Image: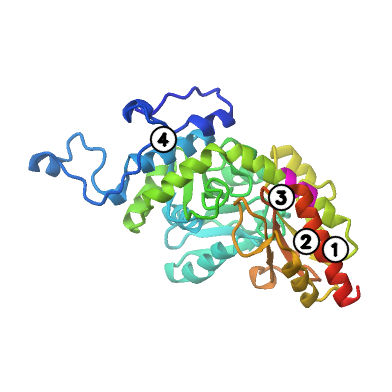
Amino acid sequence: MTKKIKKNYKIETLTSHSGLSPDDNYGIVNPPVYHASTILSPTMKDYKTKKNKKYTYGRNGTPTTDSLEYAIAKIYDAKGAVLAPSGMGAISNSLMAVLKSNDHALFPDCVYGSARRFVIEEFPRLNIQFDFYNQRDLNDIKKKIRKNTKVLYIESPGTYTFEIIDIKKVVKIAKDKKIVTIIDNTWGTALYFNAIKFGIDIVCEAITKYIGGHSDVMLGVSISNKKYLSSIKRWRLNSGQSVGPDDVFLALRGLRTLPLRLEKSYKNSKKIASFFSSLKEVKNVFHPALNNHPDHKLWKRDFSGASGIFGIEFQKNISEQAVEYFADCCILFGKGASWGGFESLMTMMDLEPNRSLKNSYLPDGPYLRIYVGLENIEDLINDIENAINKMRKKYRI
């Protein structure tokens, strides 16, 4: 029996206690890891009727997966959650659970690159129509809604350039037209932006990022209230997806320290973003928590904190080779994809292939996506400062 958790507990308490059932496990705090494919029945009759049988086959769920799904649903105050093998798996599960042939869907032009690829490559052969909209232009959304529009997909902030959308107005537009809203909420998480409480129908999150928190887990999750849960579960079942029990165990462990890690990453990133803003080589810093971000007021209204990931645009006269050299001179910032782990990262981005609209923002100079982890802030700033000075000296800036 899962431990009863009061509804009025704060989210830091929920992340520590949700999904635990020590009374069922000899007093052991953490849920056991069930490695299972075959699950036996006591008699053939029980097998045929599945009488009193919650678990029937490993792919369909175990007490281990139930613990994580329950815990994540609890921190969102939602009816339920459905695990997927990756964040992108959660996105595709959510979309395919709702859309069918001849439906139409809207996506922000700043959508996550893998989601864009899925839409562009798979929707045409499924006879699903789609358009991209400008995240900062609500009239663009209204103009592109059709009679057959079934899904309005949201990211806030947007991938790479970190635009914040007016969620309250977008949800109202969708509800007035009876359109399903789906959001990728990996950046804010339930701690800093509970999308369910804003009226979003389906929330997707990459557990790979902050919940996992250690760069060693691939998992995703879809969170929803009762209306869409069964459809998401059905699609996951029919598409043959399952998640590894060891990854689930690691995600449960990561969940317990999520508030501490997220707060540290947020505070570190804000200081690093401010430091980059002071550099003459940097034209723009795209971090919603900074006062000069164009959507700062919206972020402040709707979010209670920020992620550790943001973008910086270098001045046009700074070459890509110089920025690559700068990144290579940073010792503490790994060069690689993903984010949400304990270690800081830098990734050089080419945004043009990930934009379809002429009025979407594209940087003039080289662009770096920065993720700030849990290292000492002075060490991180010194690392960047030393790398900048080496770049200036080598390229005579």
* Residue type beneath disc 4: Asn
Number of the label disc, if any, that sits on residue 282 = 1
Distance from disc 3 to disc 2, alpha carbons, whole Å, reads: 16 Å
Distance from disc 1 to disc 3, alpha carbons, whole Å, reads: 22 Å
Residue 303 pos. (x, y %): 69, 40
Q: Would you call the spot at circle 2 few (<14 residues within 10 Å), some (14-19), or many (20 or more)? A: many
Q: Earlier in the sequence, mark 1 or mark 3?
A: 3
Q: Is residue 379 visible?
A: yes
Residue 215 pos. (x, y %): 55, 55
Find numbered disc 1 in the image and state the secondary structure of the residue it sits on: strand
Residue at image mark 3: 164
Nearer to the camera, 195 or 216: 216
Up the image or down, 297 lies above or below 143; here it is: above
Find numbered disc 2 in the image and state the secondary structure of the residue it sits on: strand
Which span of residues is magenta-colored? 267-272
| Labels 1 & 2 near each other (Cβ < 8 A) | yes
